[in-house]
Image: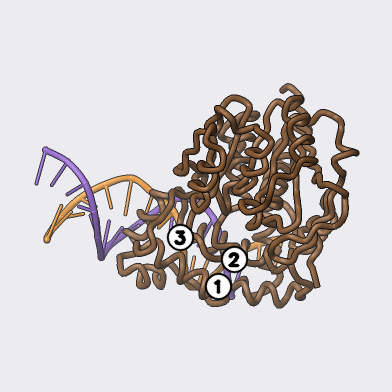
Chain colours: A brown, B orange, C purple
Amino acid sequence: MAMLERHIAIVIHAGVQALDVAGPVDVFAEANGILGGSACYRTVLVTRTREPTTASNGMRLLPDLSFEEAHQPFSIVLVAGGPQLPASPPDAELSTWLRTAAARADLYGSICTGAFALGHAGLLDGRAATTHWQVAQQLAALFPRAKIDPDRIYLRDGGLITSAGVTAGIDLALALVAEDHGAEVAQAVAKRLLVIAQRQGGQSQFSPFLMAPVDAGSPLARVQRYVLEHLGETLAVKQLAGVAQTSERTLWRLFKDVGLTPHDFVEGARVDAARNLLEGSEIPLKTVAYDCGFGNPERMRAVFCRRLGLSPAQYRDSFRMRAGTFKAAE
DNA sequence: GCGATTTTCCGCCAGA
DNA sequence: ACTCTGGCGGAAAATC
């Protein structure tokens, strides 16, 4: 198997959406784990001055390189999004850096509203691109020479790859892994991450690698909501069938359509919630295990090892120590 | 860490 | 005829 190295730069800025950064970083890290020696994704965070940057949720991101330092060619350059980006004026320094880096990269692109930075740099002209649906019109108005398609999770046009909101950065990264190593590897990464948008609250858009989008009133959406609101309790299939107002057999079929089993979904939701607590707090493992419905730390450990390949304690450590370390604010 | 028990998964079939 | 639903039961997995 050919060794493939991908040196990836993720551009961050004040008020960046933390998930836009953490999502792709997670995916590439998991892909490295699954592929062992046959692939090496190296991710660095790049920003203007290498000052610690505060994300929109208060999390502090520590960049690896400043624009000045990041002069080596990157194979992939991605601009992360953030709520203020659409309204921000053009940033000459960022635009210059992006044009140079994009010209030397195999691929360049954006996550969510990161597309605005590409637009200001003239990198969307004449290309097809997408962004978060809420700002798609604004993007199209601001950069009339770009062809904006708001209905896509991610969109590839030659060397340009753009993606929509929420989990889209994860989907974009999964798509890149799929291109490099095939859909099966991307599936394996996705399974391990169990990408669930609800992790950040709000939107109900699931990763297409795991689930098709679900409309809010459907039985599946009710089960989804119920599970996320009752994570600390036992969630038996029988009980979930009651919530969905269908039989267990039908509930099972509904999940199957979407590539999961009920138990898979519940377990994934528990792991996801636990990951959030492990990443963002110093809450003891015992409490995390209890709050997320694992009942005891031993069971949580077993599930973590099976799904993520590391224990909760290791997960917490690796998250702290990852390149471009994320540290909880406060 | 192992055997017993419970729960989940899913093919098969029947009724709406 | 075709699709959707739900019960049954046994293999497999999870849990105790």
The span from disc 2 to disc 3 (Cα, nearest Å) is 12 Å
The x, y position of residue A234, in whole percent, is: 52, 75
State the separation of the CA atoms marked 1 and 2. Answer: 6 Å
Q: A285 or A219: nearer the eye?
A: A219
Amino acid type, label 1 = Leu
Which residue is drawn at the image coordinates 65% and 36% (left, top)? Answer: A109
Does residue A36 appear in this view? no
Q: Which of marks 2 and 3 is in front?
A: 2
Q: Earlier in the sequence, mark 2 or mark 3?
A: 3
Element type where label 2 sits in the image: helix
Q: In this rendering, do the residues under marks 2 and 3 share a single chain?
A: yes
- At label 3, the amino acid type is Pro
Q: Considering the image in quadrants, where does the C terminus of chain A appear?
A: bottom right
- Distance, label 1 to label 3, CA atoms, is 14 Å
Q: Where is residue A206 in the image (x, y as percent from the top left)?
A: 50, 53
Which of the pair A300/A85 is nearer the observer? A85
> Label 3: how many residues lie within 10 Å, few (<14), some (14-19) or many (20+)?
many
Q: Residue A262 carries which label?
A: 3
| Residue appearing at x 45%, y 48% in the figure | A259
Report which quarter residue C16 is drawn in. Answer: bottom right
Q: Can residue A57 be seen in this view?
A: yes
Above or below A224: residue A194: above
Residue A273, above or below A78:
below
Which kind of residue does numbered mark 2 sit on? Answer: Arg
Q: Earlier in the sequence, mark 1 or mark 3?
A: 1
Q: Mark 1 points at which residue?
A: A231
Whether marks 1 and 2 lie on the same chain: yes
Question: Which residue corresponds to mark 2?
Answer: A270
